[in-house]
Image (cartoon, rainbow, N blue to C red):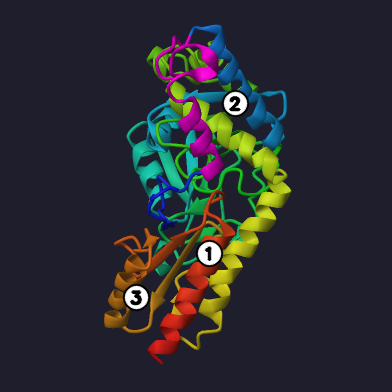
Amino acid sequence: MSNQKSVYNFNAGPSALPREVLEKAQSELVDFKESGMSIMEMSHRSATYEEVHNQAINRLRSLFSIPENYEVLFLQGGASLQFAMIPMNFLSAGKKASYIMSGAWSDKALKEAKTIGEVYEAASTKGTNYNRVPSTEEITFDEQDAYVHITSNNTIFGTQFQEFPDTGNIPLIADMSSDILSRPVDVSKFGMIYAGAQKNLGPSGVTVAIIRKDLLENANSSIPTILKYSTHASNNSLYNTPPSFGIYMLGEVLGWMEQQGGLDKIAKNNEEKANLIYNVIDNSNGFYTGHAEKDSRSLMNITFRVADEQLEKQFLQEAKEAGFVGLNGHRSVGGCRASAYNAVPYAACEALKQFMVDFQAKHK
């Protein structure tokens, strides 16, 4: 019988992984497919690893319905490196790029792009501490822009775009680090989608980039070789040694998603999980208050405050003692945050719901 401590993992990232995937990785860790080696020990040029690598790409293509005219890349450096690589590749001299500002990560992306070329804000909700995403009517960009950049979900503030702006012929580039594969998305509406793996796709260390091929063909060529997306596309993401264990884990998480019934079923599960907690907030008569406006609420990151500051500290302490991990909100918002990514079980959200109800009952 296992003596493993049981916790409810609501960390914002790195975050919960499916238990089934972890157990499979544990069983294959020392001897992968009777090779006598761990997946972490074998050459990334070997046929055994290449099969793992390509299976992960094919599973991602299938689950996310990625059209054939898009490349799927596995990169390193997290989404933060993409903040620089995107303008290096796609923001040519004499062009501008526009950024839709909805939180801390879009702010970081904009600041990085400013070091490379001319950029501007297409819309911003900073004035209300990013408690909502900009509406379609608020977004203005130039038809000559190199691209429009958007952050689909905002981990710190708990907001999420429910629909994406139509940018016409201008490539729409989306940082989907915290909600990729949490719901169906029409990939063909985007020039590029990128995401760090450590929230919905697997462990930290892998970054996924999905890029329309015509953008690669017209990208800037006078940048370092390893920073060109075309380099990685032409080498099947094997130009240099990839994070092989992370890619193996990503492929297994994608396999787990297939077993769950695909993105339609996963989206329904995510909505049900988040609603458990949002319903407690909405029916608490002000004891709990959400940071995000209702029409911008994230299904991935649920941000809220407890009415009294001392009670909030007590809430977080008692939650920690009860086995809830990662409920402290980000310092820029404060309060509490429950990150209910794909692999967070329904039972964990149900337990948090009951804890919140019981805590309120004790402190009315």
Find out whether residue 114 is within the magenta segment: no
Viewer-side residue, 33 vs 349: 33
Give the residue number, with chain letter if any, for mark 3: 315
Q: Earlier in the sequence, mark 1 or mark 2?
A: 2
Q: Where is residue 271 in the image (x, y as percent from the top left)?
A: 64, 61
In the depicted structure, whether residue 339 falls above or below residue 39: below
The amino acid sitting under disc 1 is Cys
- Left/right placement of residue 192 relative to residue 258 reads left
At label 2, counting other C-alpha atoms closer than 10 Å, the crowd grade (few under 14, some 14-19, many 20 or more) is many
Dot label at residue 56: 2
The verdict on residue 35 being magenta is: yes
Extent of the magenta region: 19-44
Task: Please identify the quarter of the rendering in which residue 117 is found.
Answer: top left
At 31% from the left and 82% from the top, the residue drawn is 311
**Element type at mark 1:** helix
- State which tag comes first along the sequence, 1 or 3: 3
Q: Do the residues labelled 2 and 3 touch (CB within 8 Å)?
A: no
Residue 156 seen anywhere in this rendered image of the structure: yes
Mark 3 residue type: Phe
In this rendering, position of residue 201 left or right of residue 268 = left
Amino acid at pointer 2: Ala
